[in-house]
Amino acid sequence: MQHCVAHSLHLLKTVDSLWRIEEIKDLTQNCRDIVTTLHFKSDLLDDEATAVANLAQLAEIQAKISEVNGVVETDDQINI
């Protein structure tokens, strides 16, 4: 669907001579700038999501370590 919209806009611009209208040229350039910026920023967002997931995994590991430490301390306190 996205390709069809982009193709239609391209045809309007090139075939139907809408490219001669200054406002349309400006709007098209602004849209291109936004898409380009978001495209390159998406890699940063993906990296941030991975870092957050890693922090969540680290928190789970730390909770398990604390649980094991509690069990070990309890074992140390019991006189056999």
Image (cartoon, helix red, strand yellow):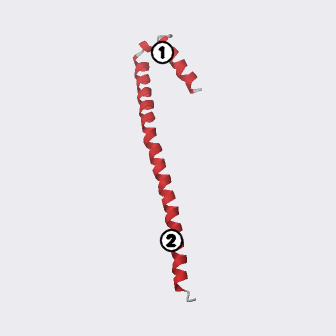
Check the image and name the residue furthest to the right.
1
The kind of secondary structure element at disc 2 is: helix
Estimate the spatial distance between the alpha carbons at disc 1 and disc 2, rounded to whole Å: 63 Å
Measuring 50% from the left and 57% from the top, which residue is drawn there? 56
Measuring 45% from the left and 51% from the top, which residue is drawn there? 51
**Residue sitting nearer the eye, 26 or 45:** 45
Location of residue 68 in the rendering, given as x and y in whole percent from the top left corner: 53, 72
Measuring 45% from the left and 39% from the top, which residue is drawn there? 43
Query: Relative to 53, is 22 on the left or the right?
Result: left
The kind of secondary structure element at disc 1 is: helix
Tell me if mark 1 has few (under 14), some (14-19) or many (20+) residues whose alpha carbon lies within 10 angstroms of its own. some
Quarter occupied by residue 28: top left
> Badge 1 is on which residue?
13
- Three-letter code, disc 1: Lys
Quadrant, the N terminus: top right
Quarter occupied by residue 5: top right
Tell me if mark 2 has few (under 14), some (14-19) or many (20+) residues whose alpha carbon lies within 10 angstroms of its own. few
Measuring 51% from the left and 15% from the top, which residue is drawn there? 12
Image depth: mark 1 or mark 2 in front: 2
Location of residue 22 in the rendering, given as x and y in whole percent from the top left corner: 39, 17
For marks 1 and 2, the one nearer the N-term is 1
Location of residue 20 in the rendering, given as x and y in whole percent from the top left corner: 42, 12
**Residue sitting nearer the eye, 74 or 39:** 74
Quadrant, the C terminus: bottom right
User: In this rendering, is residue 41 above or below 14?
Assistant: below
> Badge 2 is on which residue?
66
User: In this rendering, is residue 40 above or below 61?
Assistant: above
Query: Relative to 61, is 21 on the left or the right?
Result: left
